[in-house]
Image (spheres, rainbow, N blue to C red):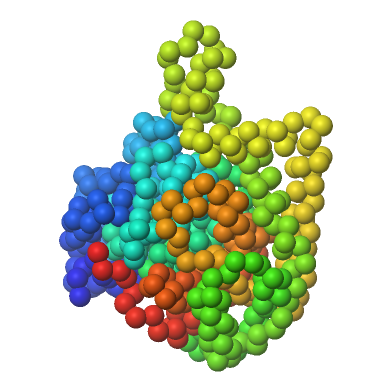
């Protein structure tokens, strides 16, 4: 087995035993990035010098014994997670040269554990998109077939993990951006409960929906990453004051009990969604049977307001975005246009040149929907719908522990196929948006392939703070569904 093939867990074990070093593993991954990333284009920044220095320090800690889990593990970050001294662009021209003065809390936690920060990953500008085609810099490609998108907005993260360029990655999920690219690239993506992971140092898109989470090669690695990044943070006022469990114990629970005692709900409204690809539908059916075979009881449930989720999300998210992105005005951060002679024109020119089309569209939608006279009709109503969606899940979780659904209606589409059709693009989020609206956790687990060999995942969602059930059921699925080669040949 080549070094780059090792999962996070395997690499960590071998390092602890002294059979491999962090420097060797980091070098192997950097070599692989050097050889293949011009084909995939997952990275905006590869931080070779710092990564090797961090790996050297990790090896010293490992040699002393009692190094924490994750020490020496090379991890890459979506480029909207602030890294002190390392460019953080958000996939945008407006932050093209922005170098943060501080680390995001998740980055400090990874550093404390001795992880190695190998680089920063491409994304849709300010996390707005479902395909990575909105990056201001270049298009990341799906490693299973480079004519296809990797999904978005954390497409760089999912493509990097699938390509075996890093042991694991962090992404962010506002409406599906961890789970959907995870599904399209054949890797595991976990969106934690809102408040579980600190957002301090995550550049905000829609603050009430955003959550950082892991993208990994398997479910066990997702649990290990969760152990490293969760916990209350006084620097984030929305961070929950709850203790984080040892997430890996969920897998032990599966090993001893399977899924006995677990009830899985299938929302009947999801069968009414139009345009579901037949391979997605059959993968979903297979996953349902596997969960049943593993001992779960599968029941029919109802989420009556599911049909309004896309409309409500595409009001709430742009409203919050329009407020959050107001700070990029050419005065405080990033790009400033110097051609104008007065302040108002400087604002106008900076934003016109710095923001791409999709970001400008959303700022305009959000500003309009929040303006006097329209607030109640749009933002106010969308917020009421959001409350109804939360209520739907609360009722559903009275009779089931986990909700099963597809991740996206289709496997990864071709580059350019939907760029002129924002509605189709927005509808591709139909299964993932609700978890963000309700603040509940969701995981996408690889479950099959389309007839043209593109990966297809399924999604599991659970009660707030019950990531343990997701990991347990996800682990069962992963162990049981035979998927052939686990990573693409580059
Ligand atoms: N595709 C959705 C959007 O564009 C979700 C993005 C995300 O989760 N960051 O808003």
Question: Where is residue 244 shown, x and y percent of the image?
Answer: 55, 64
x 63%, y 45%: residue: 317
Q: Is residue 424 left or right of residue 220?
A: right
x 59%, y 61%: residue: 432
Check the picture and name the quadrant holding the C terminus.
bottom left
Question: Where is residue 188 shown, x and y percent of the image?
Answer: 44, 68
Residue 202 appears in the figure:
no
Q: Is residue 479 left or right of residue 58?
A: right
Q: Is residue 85 left or right of residue 421?
A: left
The furthest residue to the top: 341
Residue 415 appears in the figure:
yes
Question: Where is residue 431 shown, x and y percent of the image?
Answer: 61, 64
Question: Where is residue 81 shown, x and y percent of the image?
Answer: 44, 45
To which quarter of the image does residue 343 belong? top right
x 49%, y 82%: residue: 476
With respect to residue 120, does 25 lie above or below?
Answer: below
With respect to residue 195, does 446 lie above or below?
Answer: below
To which quarter of the image does residue 22 belong? bottom left
Q: Is residue 441 left or right of residue 387?
A: left
Front in this rendered view, residue 14 or 270: 270
Number of dots carrying numbers: 0
With respect to residue 426, does 68 lie above or below?
Answer: below
x 55%, y 53%: residue: 425
Check the picture and name the quadrant holding the N terminus.
bottom left
């Amino acid at each position: 087995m080549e070094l780059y093939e090792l999962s996070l867990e395997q690499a960590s074990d071998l390092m602890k035993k002294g059979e491999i070093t962090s420097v060797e593993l980091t070098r192997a991954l950097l070599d692989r990035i050097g050889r293949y990333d011009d084909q995939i284009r997952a990275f905006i920044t590869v931080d070779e010098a710092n990564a090797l220095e961090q790996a050297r320090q990790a090896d010293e800690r490992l040699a002393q014994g009692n190094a924490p889990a994750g020490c020496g593990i090379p991890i890459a970050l979506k480029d909207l997670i602030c890294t002190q001294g390392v460019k953080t662009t958000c996939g945008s021209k407006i932050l093209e040269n922005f170098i943060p003065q501080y680390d995001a809390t998740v980055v400090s936690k990874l550093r404390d554990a001795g992880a190695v920060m190998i680089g920063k990953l491409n994304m849709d500008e300010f996390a707005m998109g479902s395909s990575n085609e909105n990056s201001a810099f270049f298009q990341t490609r799906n490693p299973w077939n480079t004519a296809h998108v990797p999904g978005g907005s954390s497409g760089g993260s999912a493509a990097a993990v699938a390509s075996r360029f890093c042991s694991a990655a962090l992404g962010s999920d506002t409406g599906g951006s961890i789970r959907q690219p995870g599904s399209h690239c054949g890797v595991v993506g976990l969106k934690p409960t809102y408040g579980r992971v600190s957002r301090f140092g995550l550049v905000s898109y829609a603050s009430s929906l955003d959550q950082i989470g892991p993208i990994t090669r398997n479910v066990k690695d997702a649990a290990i990453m969760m152990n490293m990044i969760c916990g209350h943070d006084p620097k984030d006022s929305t961070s929950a004051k709850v203790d984080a469990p040892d997430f890996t114990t969920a897998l032990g629970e599966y090993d001893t009990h399977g899924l006995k005692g677990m009830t899985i709900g299938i929302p009947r409204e999801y069968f009414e969604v139009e345009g579901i690809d037949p391979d997605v539908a059959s993968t979903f059916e297979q996953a349902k049977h596997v969960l049943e075979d593993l001992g779960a009881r599968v029941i029919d449930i109802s989420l009556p307001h599911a049909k309004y989720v896309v409309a409500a999300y595409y009001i709430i998210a742009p409203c919050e975005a329009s407020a959050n992105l107001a700070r990029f005005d050419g005065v405080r951060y990033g790009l400033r246009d110097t051609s104008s002679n007065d302040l108002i024109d400087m604002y106008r020119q900076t934003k016109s040149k710095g923001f791409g089309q999709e970001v400008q569209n959303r700022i305009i939608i959000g500003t309009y929907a929040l303006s006097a006279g329209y607030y109640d009709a749009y933002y106010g109503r969308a917020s009421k719908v959001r409350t109804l969606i939360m209520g739907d899940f609360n009722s559903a979780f009275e009779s089931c522990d986990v909700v099963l659904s597809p991740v996206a209606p289709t496997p990864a589409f071709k580059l350019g196929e939907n760029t002129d059709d924002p509605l189709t693009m927005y509808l591709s989020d139909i299964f993932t948006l609700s978890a963000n609206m309700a603040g509940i956790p969701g995981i996408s687990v690889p479950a099959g392939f389309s007839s043209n060999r593109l990966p297809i995942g399924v999604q599991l969602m659970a009660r707030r703070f019950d990531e343990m059930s997701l990991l347990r059921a996800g682990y069962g699925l992963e162990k049981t569904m035979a998927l052939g080669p686990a990573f693409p040949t580059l």
